[in-house]
Amino acid sequence: MSCPPAVGKIGSHILRHLKRGASPLFVAIQGPQGSGKSFLTALVKSYLSDSPHSLRVATLSIDDLYLPHDGLKTLADEYPDNPLWRGRGQPGTHDIVLGSRILESLKKGGEVIELPRFDKSLFDGEGDRLPLDGTGVVVQPPTDVVIVEGWCTGFYPISDTEVKARWDGVWEEQKAKLGIDDSIVGTIENIKQVNEMLHRYVYLWSFFDVCIQLSPAALPDNVSPYSIIYIWRLEQEHYMKAKNGGKGMTDAAVKLFVDRYIPGYVFFGNGVTEGYGGANILLPSPRSVGVDGVDKNTVTAAQCEPRWRGRGLRLVLDAQRNVVEEVNF
């Protein structure tokens, strides 16, 4: 099977910014459900690891940083009125302390690290983290490139004023176009709760030197730009069911599944290219969060632009996931 052109484009972008002998180059890959980010990440790892590049590459999905099942249940119990946290997915459902420790260890080098794994099939599909018992992927130092992929990788929080503006504006518009029921998302207060949790993720983003964004091509004005995500995710489900004897979600269940993620794109998605969204207010300092997750100091929003600005690459994909445009940011 021939390698998709996107692999070479991503690989070349990474090589362009790689400095051999320095600390590992940290690369974020962000793309919506069904865009092929996990598939491409695996191929990019092979592209960089094989001759002639022969680089040492570690890859991690942000999905593997989900809280253990008990942690997800505790979060849902603490916020019973927030439907966005009735299951994994949204910011707030990841273990930022664990993620911080892993990235810090990979950056320093010198120690063997077993990467976490989250098994989505456990607890009737609610999922749970697997034990770090040596059976997972073990990274031997040193590494040249660290790639972390995820649907919300690089999403930034926004101000309360901006939350209100998007709630009354673009969210109302997209909700109507996509037929999303209010019960799936909840209230503006629920969005603010997720937004508050997203502040902690800024520390993780501070590691990344380069960002790759997989973005759907523009659609007609009367069609939601997020509608292709439903098609892509449904294609994935059908493919999986064809392979496993029909086990998986119904088409209606896939629709509800994707519905829960759409607010993340609408409210926080442009943080990948723009950073913090809103007025110049105080934010947690990435340097102060650390592995204990405690915010001690603050910096202004002007200082919270993405570290990868000027080293970002957006690959615009058509409905068949072919690259139709490249944009540097």
Image (cartoon, rainbow, N blue to C red):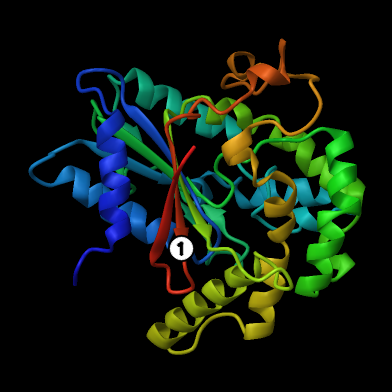
Q: Residue at x 25, y 35 (%)?
A: 15
Q: Secondary structure at mark 1?
A: strand
In the picture, the quarter occupied by the N terminus is bottom left
Examine the rendered structure and indicate whether residue 328 appears above or below residue 246.
above
Q: Residue at x 58, y 19 (%)?
A: 290
Kind of residue at disc 1:
Leu
Is residue 296 among what the camera can see? no
Residue 91 in percent (x, y) is at: 68, 44
User: Looking at this rendering, what residue extends furthest in the left direction?
Assistant: 52
Q: Residue at x 84, y 48 (%)?
A: 166
Q: Report the front residue among 327 and 20.
A: 327
Residue 56 in percent (x, y) is at: 21, 36
Examine the rendered structure and indicate whether residue 295 appears above or below residue 86.
above
The number of numbered discs placed on residues in the rendered structure image is 1
Corner quadrant of residue 275 = top right
Compared across the picture, whether 27 is left or right of 192 comes to: left
Residue 125 in percent (x, y) is at: 59, 68
Q: Residues within 10 Å of mark 1 (few under 14, many from 20)?
A: some
Q: Which residue is mark 1?
A: 317
Is residue 298 among what the camera can see? yes
Q: Report the front residue among 105 and 17.
A: 17
Corner quadrant of residue 26 = top left
Q: Report the front residue among 270 and 71.
A: 270
Q: Residue at x 54, y 31 (%)?
A: 205
Q: Report the front residue among 178 and 236.
A: 178
User: Looking at this rendering, what residue extends furthest in the top direction?
Assistant: 297
Compared across the picture, whether 10 is left or right of 328 comes to: left
